[in-house]
Amino acid sequence: MPSVKFRICNDSTVFCFGFSPTDKQNSQHMKLFGLTGGIASGKSTVSRQLTAEGVHVIDCDVIVRQLQEPDSACVRQIRKHWPHVVDGAGVLDRDALSAIAFADPAARRTISGIMNRPIVVAIMSALLAAWWQRRAVVVLDMPLLFETKVFTYLISASILIACEPDTQVARLNTRNELDAEEAKLRIAAQMPLAAKVKMADYVVQNGSGVSQATLAKDVSRCLVWMRS
Ligand code: ADP
């Protein structure tokens, strides 16, 4: 009677699940890539293109939103610390919580303590579902991939969307209507771009001067590399 096991390989194929580690017939390979980058670097833009080109993308922002649905267990815990960010119907004011998190490292640690474990469980479930659906190439879109580290041990390679801080500030101003000071605070709360570039396996440049069309071409090139 075979037992279901999975193993994680650090070679070209990662996530090799099978009925036994040596059972080649029943095992199935799934390449898993981590997609990351600073806030407003262009991750969602790249994710949308990858999805359109048939890649299965697991979006951590969507997972967090699902975990923070009205009156969820996570929201109830958040309310214990910051009652004013949750209304009477249990709806979380995500912008207000972000402002608290980015302004105060201690608050950030408390929020991580509430959110991290459910996020990891939800991502692992999504990865298992992707494997079960026999997805060959899967992308984990995770803004804090390098900061939280845990998923760097599971991915076969990381892809960084690189963008210099001045462009991030400009995009945050347009997209989120944040002033420069608030935008810089949020950028400073993340690992610096230079450190991320050193850790990444593949870097897609998306700073000032990179048009949407150029970005799309570079992402297509990256996809060829991912599927190779
Ligand atoms: P992230 O998901 O990393 O926070 P987004 O993909 O949402 O970033 O991009 C942030 C903003 O910048 C969006 O409004 C997006 O349309 C814009 N943007 C991204 N890349 C480019 C680009 N190459 N040229 C112009 N605008 C861009």
Image (cartoon, rainbow, N blue to C red):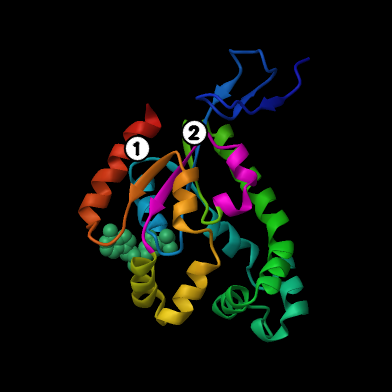
Is 103 rendered above or below residue 207?
Answer: below
Secondary structure found at label 2: loop
Magenta stretch holds residue 120? no
Which quarter of the frame holds ligand 1?
bottom left
Looking at the rendered structure, the kind of residue marked 1 is Leu
Name the residue nearer the viewer: 17 or 201: 201
Q: Is residue 130 left or right of residue 5?
A: left
Q: Residue at x 41, y 57 (%)?
A: 44
**How busy is the neighbourhood of tag 2: few (under 14 within 10 Å), some, or many (20 plus)?**
some
- Location of residue 24 (image quadrant): top right
Is 161 rendered above or below residue 97?
Answer: above
Magenta stretch holds residue 151? yes
Point out residue 73 in the picture as x, y percentages from the top left corner: 74, 66
Q: Residue at x 46, y 60 (%)?
A: 38
Secondary structure found at label 1: helix
Residue indicated by mark 1: 223
Give the magenta range: 145-164
Q: Is residue 18 left or right of residue 228?
A: right
Residue indicated by mark 2: 135
